[in-house]
Image: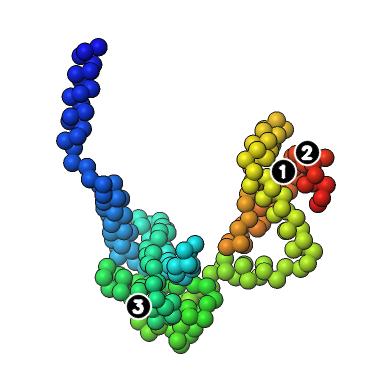
Amino acid sequence: MRLNACLVKTMSKKSKNIPLSNSTVSQRIKDMSIDTEAAINERIKKSPFFSIQVDESTDVSDLSILLVIARYFNVNELEENLLLCYPLTKRCADEDIFNVIQGYFCENEIDWAKCCGVCTDGGNSICGCYKGLRGRIKIVAPHVAWIHCCIHRQSLAAKPLPESLKEVLNQSVKFVNFIKANSTNTRLFKSLCGDMGSLHSTLLLHTEVRWISLGNVLTRLFQLRHEIHMLFEDHPFYVEL
């Protein structure tokens, strides 16, 4: 017993001598991110061509964030990685967005000549042929092809839903939220699905940001319609609907 106490005391003294500061973990994370960024930039430089997807959105703190995702060849395989995540603290005009991307490309010696395509949404500050980001990129890379983001197109197409389909969506979202927002209902539903031998045991949440998730939500809801009916049978929530 005394030997173990001495051993613990000795190990405690050795651990105190390890030079760990409050910022050690954050510094390690920063070093790892720098190394990953350098590796991605090196792959883009070695790739015969690459394309980028540009999007500007606002986070929960109302801060505008510029996101640039790059797609490139790496050992004869297509890879897609986040290239740039930069906060836009002042304006979010086409000039500001272009200057951020141009400055990053110059700093990391990325050649615009290898950029074959740019994918963006339909915002006025981005898709303008002359004054938008699209037009500014065309000045430094005239060969670049511009593509409208497919997710944004689906979002625009899905928003003007007919009243009948909108009613179905609203009712479906109510069911999903009632189950997913309550831990007890979630556990009961998962147990019920397990007892019935269902292929799935959870529902999918619908998000307004990505309308492409709407089809997946409704598909999963239809697949588990019998389980949902059994869960809500004689339930006040079900009777109200």
For disc 2, the marked residue is: 230
The extreme top residue here reads 1
Q: Secondary structure at mark 1?
A: loop
Q: Does the CB distance between marks 2 and 3 fall below 8 Å? A: no
For disc 1, the marked residue is: 224
Residue drawn at point x = 61 percent, y = 62 percent: 208
Between disc 2 and disc 1, the foreground one is 2
Q: Position of residue 24 (x, y in %)?
A: 25, 47
Q: Is residue 178 left or right of residue 150?
A: right
For disc 3, the marked residue is: 99
Q: Secondary structure at mark 3?
A: helix
Q: Dot 1: few (<14), some (14–19), or many (≥20) neighbours within 10 Å?
A: some
Q: Position of residue 66 (x, y in %)?
A: 42, 69
Residue drawn at point x = 43 percent, y = 80 percent: 94
Residue type indicated by callout 1 = Leu
Q: Earlier in the sequence, mark 1 or mark 3?
A: 3
Q: Quadrant of the N terminus?
A: top left
Q: Earlier in the sequence, mark 2 or mark 3?
A: 3
